[in-house]
Amino acid sequence: MSTTEPAESLSADVVLIGAGIMSATLGMMLKELQPDLTIAIIERLDVAAAESSDAWNNAGTGHSAFCELNYTPEKADGSIDISKAVKIAEQFEESKQFWAFLAETYAVKELTRFINHIPHLSFVWGDKNVNFLRKRHAALTQSPLFQGMEYTENREEMERWMPLVMHGRDPQQPVAATRVDLGTDVNFGSLTRGMFTLLQQKPGVTFYFNHNVEKLRQKDGLWRVKAEDVSTGAPLKIRAPFVFIGAGGGSLPLLIKSGIPEGQGFGGFPVSGQWLKCVNPAVIAQHHAKVYGKAAVGSPPMSVPHLDTRVINGKQELLFGPYAGFSTKFLKQGSYLDLPLSVKLSNMRPMIIAGLKNMPLTKYLINQVRQSPEDRLEALREYLPEARAQDWQLEIAGQRVQVIKKHETEGGILEFGTEVVAASDGSIAALLGASPGASTAVSIMLGLVQRCFPEKAQSAEWQAKLRQMIPSFGQSLANNPALVEQVRSHTSAVLGLKVDAAPVQ
C-alpha cells in the first residue's frame, strides 16, 4: 500500500522507519495494546523485509543459544559463563509466545509457515575443543531452558545426527557434539510480511514505500519527519510524538540526523556476508540440522561457521558460511558513501580507538575478501569432508553494521550485539547492531515499550494485554522448569513445531 501525499504535513501517533522485523513487531505490539493508535510506516524500498529480514540475508537460526558457542565463553579459570546463553534462550521463548499469539488470533498464512523444527547441533574437534564442549554441556543443562540437550563423543551417534559432517572424516580425530531437538529455522522475511499484512488491514495504519527519510527534528514536543519519494521526488512530511528507527544498517545515519544527545558518539562498522549455497538436491536431502562450530582463534564472533538446513518458501535448502567481506555500505542496497558520511566529530574518536583495538578483525576481513573459491571450499570441507565444488555456489547475504560506542575508560568499543538508543523523554528510539536481533525482537520491543511508554506500560490494561500476548511476561523462565515446559508445549503446538516432524523435501 502506498499513499500520494499532500504538500501539508500529515499527523500520526507513531512513525516507524524501516519495514523490517523490528518495525513489524513494534507496530503489531502497539496496535494490540492500543488499537486506536495511528501509525505511519516509511520504507525506502518498494517491498517489506528486503534487507536484513529477508530469508536469504540472514542465517534464519532461531537464536536460542542451543548451538551458538560464542554465547558461552570460557572464563580464565576454565569455567563456562552461561549468562548470555540463558538470557538469549529466555528471549527467544518470549518471541515464540508472541508469534503463537498472532497465529492463534489471526488467519494469515505467513504466520503458520515461517518457522520449522530443525535440530540445533554444536560440533567440535580437537582435544581442547572437546573438553570445552563437555564443560559447556554440563553447565547449560543445569538450566531448565537447556534440559534435554544431548552430548556425545560417540561417532556412530554423530553419524545419525549429521551424516554429511561425519562421512570421510579422519577416524582418529577427537570429535564431540551436542544436540537439542527443540531447535528451529525461521523465515524472518515471511514473518515480517505476515505481520505487515495484518497491520495493513487495521484502521489508522498507512504505508509509504519508496520513501527515503531525509530529515528528523523535534519541535514543540513533536517530531517532524521529512521524507522523499525516491521515484518522483515528491515530499512527505509527518508529525508524530513518537518515532522508531528500525532501518537495519540505515538506523545509524538516521539516529545521527535526529540530533539527540543520547546518539552522540555512536558509530558503525559495516560487514558484508556471503554463503555457499548447495545446488545438489541429493546432498541437501542428506542433512537436516543446524550445525554450529567454533570460530578460529582470534576470529570475531561473526565468523562462527555453520552448516544450516533452511526452509525457504516451503523448500529445503542447505547453506554454509558465513564468509565475511568488507563494504562501506550500511545496507545491501545502500551507498558506498554510507560509512564515510557517518563519521562525525562526535563519533570520530570512538571509531578510531575501536578500530585500533580491533586490528585482528581488520586482518580477518582482509583475509576473507582475498579468499579464492578453493579457500572457501577448504573451509567447507572442515564440516563436509567430501564436499565437491560443483555442488555449491556463492551467494551474497545481508549487510551488518556492528555498533561502535563511546566508553568512559577505553574511549571506544566495538559491540557485536544489538542496542536500543532512546531519547531521555522516550520520544524517539533507534535499534542498532545485528545478531541475534531478529530472534529476540519481541524481547527488545517489550523493553522499548516499557522505556518509551512508561505510564501506559504500567497501566492495568496494558499489563493484562502484555500477559495475554506473552504469558510468561514479568516472570523468569530461567529458574522455573514448570513454566518453561508450559510455554514450550503451547507454542510448539500452535506453531506446529513437532519434534518428530519429517524434513521438508
Image (cartoon, helix red, strand yellow):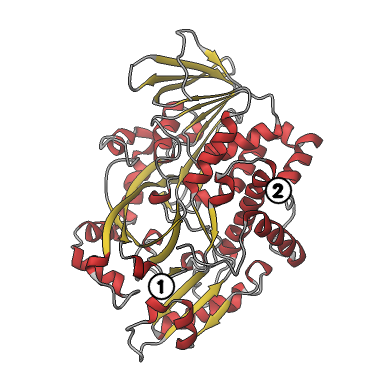
Which residue corresponds to mark 1? 286
Residue 387 visible in the picture? yes
Give the crowd class for mark 2: few <14, some 14-19, many >=20 residues within 10 Å: many
Residue 453 visible in the picture? no
The x and y percentages for residue 178 are: 52, 76
Give the crowd class for mark 1: few <14, some 14-19, many >=20 residues within 10 Å: few
The residue at 55%/64% (across/down) is 183
Is 80 in front, or is 484? 484
The x and y percentages for residue 263 are: 47, 35
> What amino acid does circle 1 point to?
Gln
Q: Are marks 1 and 2 in contact (CB under 8 Å)?
A: no
- Closest to the camera, between mark 1 and mark 2, is 1
**Dot placed on the residue nearer the N-terminal end, 1 or 2:** 1
Quadrant, the C terminus: bottom left
Relative to 436, 336 lies left or right = left
The residue at 66%/40% (across/down) is 106
Give SS at disc 2: loop
Give SS at disc 1: loop
Q: How many marks?
A: 2
Does residue 132 lie above or below 252 as drawn? below
The x and y percentages for residue 128 are: 42, 82
Relative to 321, 475 lies left or right = right
Task: Farthest residue to the bottom: give it.
Answer: 172
Is 165 in front, or is 420? 165
Does residue 366 lie above or below 225 as drawn? below
Which residue corresponds to mark 2? 470
Relative to 451, 481 lies left or right = right
User: Picture quarter containing residue 478?
Assistant: bottom right
The x and y percentages for residue 324 are: 30, 56
> What amino acid does circle 2 point to?
Ile
Is 248 in front, or is 185? 185
